Image (cartoon, helix red, strand yellow):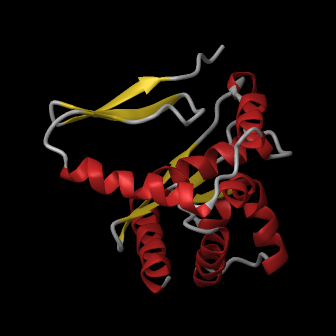
Amino acid sequence: MINYVKTAKESWKELESVSGIKFDEVDAFCYHLPFSSMGLKAHTKLAKENGSAKSREELEKQLEPTLRYCRQIGNCYSASAYFSLCSLLDNSEKDLTDRKIAVFSYGSGCAGEFFTATPVKGYKERLYTSLHQSMLASRKEIDFETYLEYYKAGDILAETSGNISCPAVTTGNFRFSGIKNHCRMYEKCLQIT
């Protein structure tokens, strides 16, 4: 947690020095979310360090739409900053057209970067909110033994020198299907319309 907050602070300073943007000029913040409280802690510390007058409640409200999906699925590792952004776009009650969004990407224990994004007019018509919410609602719970099977499959894949196929158990747009000639293989699962 200490490295995460420290990296968020240093990354914010770098963004500020390069772009001139100030903390209170940003309308929404999305964080890499190994768990949802981590983003809120970093956001609160950043607000304090940057002299923001926002109360804790205002900061929580600012992050709330970005946390909804994370609270449903937990950590999705490298995708979590973008999952936070997706959650914001799908769940924000505000029109974010031409609003500044800061995104904090974090990884490898102490590497991070803040960057900004600005949704353009018509972005709402391009969202897949219903599909995303349907996919989250249709997930199936697995027991611990099944989880261990999936977990151990990673060790088998790492040790294999040949080809191996993985069962089609995921329901997302793409899935890891196995290894062929030492290359990780993925396949498209769901047609987005």
Instruction: Identify which residue, 98 or 81, lies in the foreground.
Output: 81
Q: Is residue 124 left or right of residue 48?
A: right
Q: Is residue 155 left or right of residue 102?
A: left
Q: Is residue 58 above or below residue 146?
A: below
Q: Is residue 27 visible?
A: no
Residue at (66% x, 13% y) in the render: 193
Image location (x, y in percent) of residue 86: 64, 43
Q: Is residue 112 above or below residue 43?
A: above
Residue at (35% x, 73% y) in the render: 110
Residue at (60% x, 74% y) in the render: 38
Q: Is residue 97 above or below residue 10?
A: above
Image location (x, y in percent) of residue 178: 33, 35
Instruction: Identify which residue, 7 or 32, lies in the foreground.
Output: 32
Image location (x, y in percent) of residue 68: 75, 55
The mark tally for this picture is: 0
Q: Quadrant of the rendered structure where residue 133 is?
A: top right
Q: Quadrant of the rendered structure where residue 71 is?
A: bottom right
Q: Is residue 165 visible?
A: yes
Image location (x, y in percent) of residue 127: 70, 28
Residue closest to the far front? 145
Instruction: Identify which residue, 17 or 191, lies in the foreground.
Output: 191
